[in-house]
Image: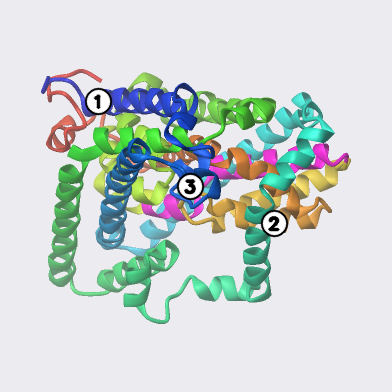
């Protein structure tokens, strides 16, 4: 049993969680225990329809709440260690560069590959949505029903976006990247401010004497390694946590809604799959001269992708993503620089999703977007993805700006909300894989991509079965 890699345990837990959620959603006669509103009951919400719930229902509620507690605790532990990992790893990476010219070159390459994959992602989204036109498959009656069901959620997001827009300009967004109080940035987990702080601190270390810089670099590197050891401990809970997170989500999700919006869901999933299984392998093949084989990449990144799928948070997954990327042979310096930056600004899956949602809703409301308007949507989607926090559901608030810019009613988000979580899980996988693919490309260009992955460090985290396994 110990020789089975951790990602297989996580995958098994994911499948069992789906089966358990389906059983709760479809296979259980809730009315027999006094529950007439299963969705509210499973979500822990009060409902008069469940006033007659008996003792059996109370026990089921306890199991549901226990599952939610275990899943939330696991995600919280990962978020706890994510900020220190970003700070220490990025400071060590910048300080390790040692010279401004090398740092500028590394940053330019990183931003360049991020921009390339983002443009490819939104282009793919426009092609799919114009060919399939998923909006035409939803009837008017279904549209009105979904708008009514999701009205409250849509209104809260529109209000949040209005508040965000009234207090925000391009200049304030740039200013907000720099924390007034660095300790507040660390406490709140504002990744963009943490990244800015780490880069500035790393640059400051490069200006010290060689002895001082070396000492400080070693200290931050040791702290980063210690954080990854903590990640190894937390990952022992991963299979159980993934089961709990998935079971709770699927149990609360209405399958009738997914069936109603199935064409949109499948079209979006297809776009995300093409990015993951075609775009990234082709980009890595071209930029590494064929050194990074797709099988090697997907095998090494399996734990991070499975965790990203179940948690829907690229920020929480970051510590595991960094360790998995190291097993691909990417140097510590490149890993520590590219991945924290990528978690903040590289969101290919989110960019594709924004374009798919806006064009889908435009089709649903019979709004014919011109080519210029579609290009505008694609450009804004990239910018919105950059500003989107790596947390579940955060992109919906920022989507309001794109909808308003092309005259699509923002209230249409009520339809998207119904299936957002399941698609959020899928696009988080793409976001995480995109960061790793960019790190591979940058490492190759810097001559810091090892010919074979360093499996020894992965064994320490339980991410690989044994050190002798050939990738």
Q: Give x and y (percent) for residue 20.
A: 37, 26
Q: Is residue 462 left or right of residue 363?
A: left
Magenta residues span: 340-366
Q: Which residue is mark 2?
A: 400
Quarter of the rendering occupied by the C terminus:
top left
- Give yes or no for residue 348 being in the magenta stretch: yes
> Crowdedness of circle 3 by 10 Å Cα count: few (<14), some, many (20+)?
few
Q: Which residue is mark 1?
A: 9
107 vs 258: above or below: below
287 vs 75: above or below: above
Q: Quick check: marks 3 and 2 in contact, CB under 8 Å?
A: no
Tell me the residue at 73%/47% (across/down): 148
- Find residue 172 and report its image quarter: bottom right
Q: Nearer the viewer, mark 3 or mark 2?
A: 3
155 vs 130: above or below: below
SS assignment for the magenta stretch, majority? helix
Q: Nearer the viewer, residue 104 or 393?
A: 393
Helix, strand or loop status at disc 1: helix
Q: Which residue is mark 3?
A: 51
Q: Quick check: marks 1 and 3 in contact, CB under 8 Å?
A: no
Helix, strand or loop status at disc 3: loop
Tell me the residue at 25%/47% (across/down): 332
Q: Give x and y (percent) for residue 9.
A: 25, 25
Residue 17, label in figure? none
Distance from Cα at disc 1 to Cα at disc 3: 39 Å
Question: Which numbered disc, 1 or 2, marks the residue that appears first in the sequence?
Answer: 1
Task: Tell me if residue 392 can be seen.
Answer: yes
Q: Quick check: marks 1 and 2 in contact, CB under 8 Å?
A: no
């Amino acid at each position: 049993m110990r020789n089975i890699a951790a990602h297989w345990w996580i995958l098994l837990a994911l499948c069992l969680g789906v089966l358990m959620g389906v059983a709760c959603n479809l296979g259980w006669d809730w009315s027999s225990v006094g529950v007439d509103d299963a969705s509210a009951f499973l979500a822990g919400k009060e409902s008069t329809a469940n006033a007659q719930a008996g003792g059996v229902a109370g026990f089921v509620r306890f199991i549901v709440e226990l599952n939610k507690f275990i899943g939330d605790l696991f995600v919280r532990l990962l978020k706890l260690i994510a900020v220190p990992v970003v700070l220490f790893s990025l400071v060590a990476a910048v300080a390790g560069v040692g010279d401004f010219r090398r740092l500028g070159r590394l940053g330019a390459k990183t931003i360049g590959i991020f921009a390339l994959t983002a443009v490819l992602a939104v282009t793919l989204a426009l092609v799919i949505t114009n060919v399939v036109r998923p909006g035409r498959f939803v009837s008017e009656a279904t549209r009105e029903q979904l708008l009514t069901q999701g009205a409250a959620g849509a209104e809260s997001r529109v209000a949040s976006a209005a508040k965000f827009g009234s207090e925000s300009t391009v200049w304030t967004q740039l200013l907000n990247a720099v924390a007034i109080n660095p300790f507040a940035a660390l406490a709140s987990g504002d990744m963009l401010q943490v990244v800015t702080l780490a880069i500035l601190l790393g640059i400051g270390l490069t200006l010290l004497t060689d002895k001082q810089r070396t000492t400080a670099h070693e200290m931050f590197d040791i702290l980063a390694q210690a954080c990854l050891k903590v990640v190894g401990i937390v990952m022992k809970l991963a299979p159980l946590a993934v089961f709990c997170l998935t079971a709770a989500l699927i149990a609360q999700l209405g399958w009738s809604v997914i069936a109603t919006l199935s064409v949109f869901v499948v079209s979006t999933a297809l776009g995300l799959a093409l990015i993951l299984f075609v775009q990234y392998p082709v980009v890595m093949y071209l930029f590494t001269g064929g050194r990074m084989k797709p099988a090697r990449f997907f095998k090494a990144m399996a734990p991070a992708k499975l965790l990203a799928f179940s948690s829907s948070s690229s920020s929480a997954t970051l510590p595991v993503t960094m360790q998995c990327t190291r097993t691909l042979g990417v140097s510590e310096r490149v890993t520590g620089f590219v991945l924290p930056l990528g978690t903040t600004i590289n969101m290919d899956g989110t960019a594709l999703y924004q374009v798919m949602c806006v064009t889908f809703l435009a089709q649903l409301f019979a709004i014919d977007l011109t080519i210029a308007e579609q290009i505008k949507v694609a450009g804004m989607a990239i910018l919105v993805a950059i500003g989107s926090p790596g947390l579940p559901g955060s992109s919906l608030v920022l989507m309001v700006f794109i909808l308003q810019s092309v005259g699509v009613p923002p209230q249409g988000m009520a339809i998207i909300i119904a299936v957002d979580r399941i698609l959020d899980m899928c696009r988080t996988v793409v976001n995480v894989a995109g960061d790793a693919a960019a790190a591979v490309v940058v490492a190759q260009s810097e001559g810091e991509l090892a010919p074979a992955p360093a499996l020894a460090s992965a064994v320490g985290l339980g991410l690989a079965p044994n050190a002798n396994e050939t990738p």
